[in-house]
């Protein structure tokens, strides 16, 4: 029986597109638009495991891409890349209304968490969260799933975990969670599998 629900964020609750950030700032960069994201990508893991702060990321990104604008402008460009996945938001609201315990487990950073928790009310529905930059490790590292189970005080065998990446779902499954791959392009297919699982 499913008693707890844990959600990934990127491409589950929020769809995201980093190319929007590159397009917004390309006219004030030394690099071409297609070169911007590859230039900052090597910092991604350090940012999402907390080894690099958002401020340090922005400062280094300015240097790497030759950005001529203000730091706050670049920060906002890299933050405002999300749109709510409405079918999952509706499911979260339905579970909240039933009083089901809801949690977040996400590879993310202090660049994005303050932004999306402020901008999107769907995050008000969650009881607790494990973010990779706070945990100091990121999915699919098994340790982050152990941290989540302890912090949320849940039995993984009674906990449904949704993620868009198969490698993360495999790691969650190995940690004992009832894990499902979610593809926002096929919500109806997910809904059928989800209903079969929770009714079983």
Image (tube, rainbow, N blue to C red):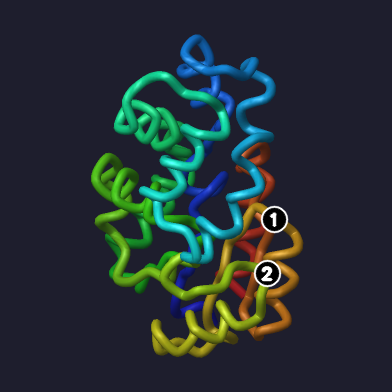
Q: Give the vertical position of 133 relative to 183 (above or below).
A: below
- Of 56 and 169, nearer the camera is 56
Which quadrant holds residue 33? top right
Residue at screen point 31% across, 54% down: 123
* Circles 1 and 2: CB atoms closer than 8 Å: yes
Q: Residues within 10 Å of mark 2 (few under 14, many from 20)?
A: some
Residue at x-position 49% and y-position 53%: 9
Q: Is residue 77 toward the left or the right of residue 65 in the image?
A: left
Q: Position of residue 51 (x, y in %)?
A: 50, 65
Q: Nearer the viewer, mark 1 or mark 2?
A: 2
Few, some or many C-alpha atoms within 10 Å of disc 1 (few <14, some 14-19, many ≥20)? some
Q: Earlier in the sequence, mark 1 or mark 2?
A: 2
Does dot 2 land on a helix, a strand or a loop? loop
Against 139, residue 148 (above or below) is below
Give me the residue at 60% from left, 83% from top. 143
Please give the residue where the numbered disc 2 appears in the rendered image: 140
Residue 165: assigned label: 1
Q: Position of residue 69 (x, y in %)?
A: 37, 20
For numbered disc 1, what is the local secondary structure? loop
Q: Residue at x 68, y 34 (%)?
A: 38
**In this picture, is 63 found above or below 134?**
above
141 left or right of 81 in image = right
List x then y, in percent, for residue 41.
64, 43
- Position of residue 132 measured from the top left corner of the image (x, y, whole percent): 50, 67
Residue positioned most to the top: 27
For the C terminus, the image quarter is bottom right
- Quadrant position of the N terminus in the picture: bottom right
Which residue is more in the foreground, 159 or 123? 123
């Amino acid at each position: 029986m499913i008693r707890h629900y844990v959600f990934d964020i990127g491409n589950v609750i929020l769809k995201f597109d980093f190319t929007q950030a590159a397009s917004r700032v390309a006219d004030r960069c030394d690099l071409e638009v297609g070169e911007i994201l590859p230039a900052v990508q090597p910092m991604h893991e350090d940012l999402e495991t907390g080894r690099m702060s958002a401020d340090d990321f922005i400062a280094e990104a300015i240097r790497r891409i030759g950005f001529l604008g203000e730091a706050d402008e670049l920060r906002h460009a890299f933050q405002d890349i999300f749109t709510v996945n409405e079918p999952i938001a509706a499911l979260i609201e339905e579970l909240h209304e039933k009083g089901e315990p809801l949690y977040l487990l996400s590879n993310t950073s202090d660049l994005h968490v303050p932004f999306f928790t402020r901008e999107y009310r769907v995050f008000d529905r969650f009881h607790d969260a494990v973010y990779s930059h706070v945990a100091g490790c990121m999915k699919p590292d098994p340790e982050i799933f152990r941290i989540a189970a302890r912090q949320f005080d849940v039995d993984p065998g009674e906990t449904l975990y949704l993620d868009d990446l198969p490698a993360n779902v495999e790691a969650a499954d190995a940690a004992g969670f009832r894990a499902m791959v979610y593809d926002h392009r096929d919500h109806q297919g997910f809904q059928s599998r989800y209903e079969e699982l929770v009714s079983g």
